[in-house]
Amino acid sequence: MENIELDIRYALGRFRAQPISTLVIVLMLALGIGATSAIFSVVNGLLLQATPFDDSDRLVILEQIEKNTGRRLGLSVPELFDYREQSSNFESIAEYHNMTFTMYGQDDPLRVRTGVVSANFFDILGIQPILGRLFNTDEDAIGAEPLVILTYEFWQKEFAGRKDITNLSVEMNNRAHKVIGVLPHFPQFPDVNDVYMAVPSCPWRSSEGALTNRGMRMMRSFAKLKSEATFTQVNQELSSISDRLYQAYPDAYTNQSPLDAQVLSLNEELVKENRPYLLTLLATTLLLFLIACANVTNLTLSQHAKRQREFAVRASLGASRWRLAQLLLTESILLALVGGLLGLTAAYLGLDFLKSFASHFTSLASEISLDTNVMLFALVVSILAGIISGLMPSLSQPNLTSALKEGGKASFSTRNGVVRNSLLVFQFALSLTLLVGAGLSLKSLNKLQNVDGGFNSEKVEIVQMDLNWSVYENPRQRWQFSQKLLSEVKQLPYVESVGLGMTYPMDTVAVNFGNLRQALRLDDRDYNPDDVLENAVTRRVSHGYFETIGARLLQGRFIRVEDDEAARRVAVINRSLAEHLWPNKSAINHRISFDNGENWVTIIGVVGDIKERLLSSPADFQIYFSMAQFPVGHFGILAKTKQAGVDFTADIRDIVAQLDSRQPLSKSESLQQAVDNSISLQQFVTQLLGIFSGLALLITISGISGVMGYLVNIRSREVGIRMAIGADKSSVIKLILTYGLKLTLLGLLLGFITAFCGGVHLTEYLFESEAFDLGVYATALSILLIVSIVACFTPAYKASSIEPMRALKSN
């Protein structure tokens, strides 16, 4: 213990005596440890930590799947009740679905995203209110008093966190609803809601159709397993129950789509989409950490060479090899701990950026923090960095005679030279791996951003609305309001075109509305009930919609004003569906029926495929109806503007206020924002990979500069002799550059192999990418070669300027 105290005091004295080299080492370690700790905080919050719910390992999602296609489905109310009654492996099964309603009672009407849940929903998750109470079992009964609970965020934003919120009455769906509590902050899944409503308060959930129709599978179910239940046991029991339901209700379960049931881990469902990307980022930062450690080890070895006389004196006075190793490890670990502290500080400063970016693709973003796990990780990594950077110098044994003769000057050691060269090769190999990974990711993102989605997002503004169903009760009323709104928006001076759509490309709210899975009757062939359309969606759009988003008309015409309720029913389909139903023929004027011939819709146009869900996925089969013939209560107002920077939302708010002062807006964004949000995860990963590869490049530059500078220093006598016998400056420069480039090329050869192996893994998650991309590899190799030449040139030029006599005398 006494020796350690002495070593610490001695190390601090050395650091003060060599501030520049000390600062360089600390900054290198801070970069590696800070980046690794920052990404570990994300991985820890999203992947490693259990969700902040009680007994999270027993929380599951109960769902149904189609046996033939694997398509995942929700549950209907009767099905949910059947699984509750017949299953023996659950402690509790709760129901959930999401709606949007209008809330009155504040200064302005609000559109609130509402989670409709059974009374046991929050009990399953182990959530307790911070104000008031939760729903109780009696309040699940149809006809119970309408009740709502506010989320923490909504309470703060709309009610300024007022403490007397409980028992406040707000109007929703033409009824007074009593606020009974406020929830704490928690990661919401699968939707981020403003309020939660008791089951009987929802008009849809309490309707006769929802209570009896087994085909209305709009609910998701969350459940808690009994402590002794396993996933295998539960899924076997659910399969047996689904088979019994199939036999008991044959009319509700057709032969074309027999159903099975299963449970999925809630923990896994929350993170499964993000897991590969986050682990890739963590692996990247670990590579950066190793590069930093290699560089610091090289710097430490250089310093060690200059201290040979000191170590020889210590050894001659009786210091053992272990005693010298302890001194060196103490110094390196102290530097690493300081670097770790700085790195952790940098990670803390970047935490808000990471949380903000992560919030675009996960509701768990708020769980990202520098908690005890992250701090412990940073401590372990710091100590590991200190051991790595201090271990190699501590293993070298000083030669007492030669060290004392050298007089404290840096001496050449073949063994240490091999180690330094190997570390430099290692840095180049890892740097190439990072550069290639960043290049592949950047190229993939660029391809994704330039995908032809079948629309033009430039200068298209969007405002979404959900008409209050209790005011606009029938389709005619909804279309009358929509017509007036369209007419007013057209008068705005900066609007080039305008249209309405129940959804739009990359919309996150209504993208799953209108899913279709059934056989169509066509006018030119016999009906085949087995010819079921997979991955088909129906959309309702007004005149002007296709023109506004820049859709391409391939055949026929777009929907027009005259395609109203008095005209024949019409539809526009996309190219994929047209080619599927009428290959090598025109689809125009063909008719389709969704009810076995009772009602027909005429195809009037074919448009290019429009990617509505993801740019990276093929377009669905799409059928667009005229909104005038099939009005909806949820729609987006899309306007193509003549110039950017207009306040479209404010103008829409004023127009809507004139038409109906009690009708709020729901959401506003530009079409380009919707596109950017759809690829936010890929942007996040690409940006961080770019940052980390840039840091790796900087560290590698300093590494090769330091090694070559050290080489010139210890070989100054040799250079002096060469120049004394006739060598010119160019030959000396060539000598040093050749030495440096040999190490560089060896590192790039090794890096090519590691980069390819990493690329094979990375391209599994990238869009249209290959593990070997000639352009990316050529660019990365060129960057590192140029960097190496530039980094070697300064010490090479310095070597060529050595005066022979001075070099000979100094050594």
Image: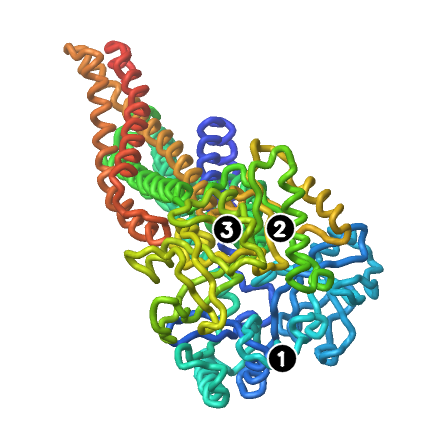
**16, above or below 192, in the image:** above
Q: Earlier in the sequence, mark 2 or mark 3?
A: 2
Local packing at callout 3 (Cα closer than 10 Å; few below 14, some 14-19, many 20+) is many
* Callout 2 amino acid: Gln
Label of residue 559 in the image: 3
Q: According to the image, label 1 marks what residue?
A: 211
Image position, residue 395 (x, y; %): 32, 43
As measured in the structure, the alpha-carbon distance from the residue carrying label 2 to the one carrying label 3 is 21 Å
- How many callouts does the rendering have? 3
Nearer mark to the viewer, of 1 and 3:
3
Q: x, y percentage for residue 368? A: 57, 53
Report whether 582 appears left or right of 127: left
Q: In the depicted view, which residue is nearer to us: 103 or 320?
A: 103
Q: Quadrant of the C terminus?
A: top left
First of labels 1, 2 by sequence position: 1
In which quadrant of the rendered view does residue 328 lie?
top left
Q: Identify the element where label 3 is drawn.
A: loop
Q: Residue 217 at what x, y percent from top left?
A: 54, 73
Q: Name the disc covering residue 464, or none.
A: 2
Earlier along the polypeptide chain: callout 1 or callout 3?
1
Please give the name of the residue rendered at 52% of the width and 53% of the height, measured from the top-left corner.
361
- Residue type, label 3: Ile
